[in-house]
Image (cartoon, rainbow, N blue to C red):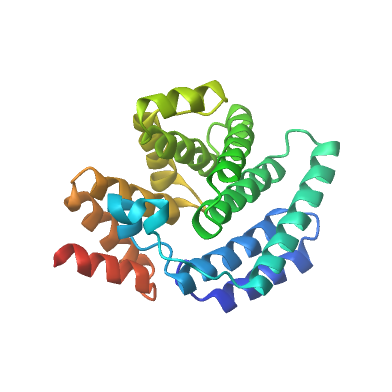
Amino acid sequence: MYNMDFTGAHRTFESWQELHPDDPLGPAGNAAAYLFSEFDRLQILEFRLFTDEKAHKDKDRPKVMPDPHIKAVFDSELAKADRIAREVLAASPENKNALFAQVLANGLRGDYAALIEKRNGPALDFLKASRTAAEKLIRIDPDYYDAYLAVGIENYMTGLRSAPVRWLLRMSGAQTNKEQGIANLKITAERGRYLAPYAQILLAIAAIRDDNPGTAIKLLSGLIEEFPQNRLYRRELARLHD
């Protein structure tokens, strides 16, 4: 998936589901492949949309036309992941794979709502649900490093808001500590099993926003070495060298 071979990623996830029908991470992972294929098609993860304040404003974002078929299969895979996770957790409330599937499913829904549908309110609700499940998972197993990404994303993204907005978000139960967000993203970036590359991209974006292109270049160079077919990583690195 990180090499942008989405067809191959779907084959892998679908084969896993056939062999492990009781593992919710299979359909959750397949949903992630559908989401990232849409991100690629719509060029949604271009860094300038997150680092340029003018481009970051809702009214200035380029209009995108989501593929209704992709949305339907994305939702279907997430619904399957939800169902399996609930069944597993009913029998084993501390099952780590099932909890992480919930973390991942709500995080993916939040990404789709925010970045494709431009619905920031529902996106925040999904991020909070993802973070809550992640915190439960971390309490059970502090070494489940992928879970820290959900805590990091909510803290970092909401921590960028103005002080009054952060106060309102905290009143609604959101976490808004930007520095804590970066710290949690680093945990996933350095030690995560599934989400380390995604955390590294988020840290690269954060570095550019903080006027630290050297860190972004180092992160992107490492990603290109690991995933040489990823056009996004190469394109963004070239822009930083311009």
Name the residue at 68% across, 54% down.
25
**Relative to 95, 90 lies left or right:** right
Q: Work out whether residue 232 can be spotted.
A: yes
Residue furthest left in the image: 242
Expressed as whole percent of the image width and height from the top left, the position of residue 18 reads 78, 68
Name the residue at 52% across, 65% down.
36
Relative to the observer, which residue lies in front, 115 or 153? 115
Q: Work out whether residue 200 can be spotted.
A: no
Up/down of 13 relative to 204, above or below = below
The total of numbered circles placed on residues is 0
**Relative to 91, 75 lies left or right:** left
Relative to the observer, which residue lies in front, 41 or 64? 64
Q: Quadrant of the C terminus?
A: bottom left
Expressed as whole percent of the image width and height from the top left, the position of residue 111 reads 54, 52
**Relative to 111, 82 lies left or right:** right
**Relative to 142, 101 lies left or right:** right
Relative to the observer, which residue lies in front, 9 or 203? 203
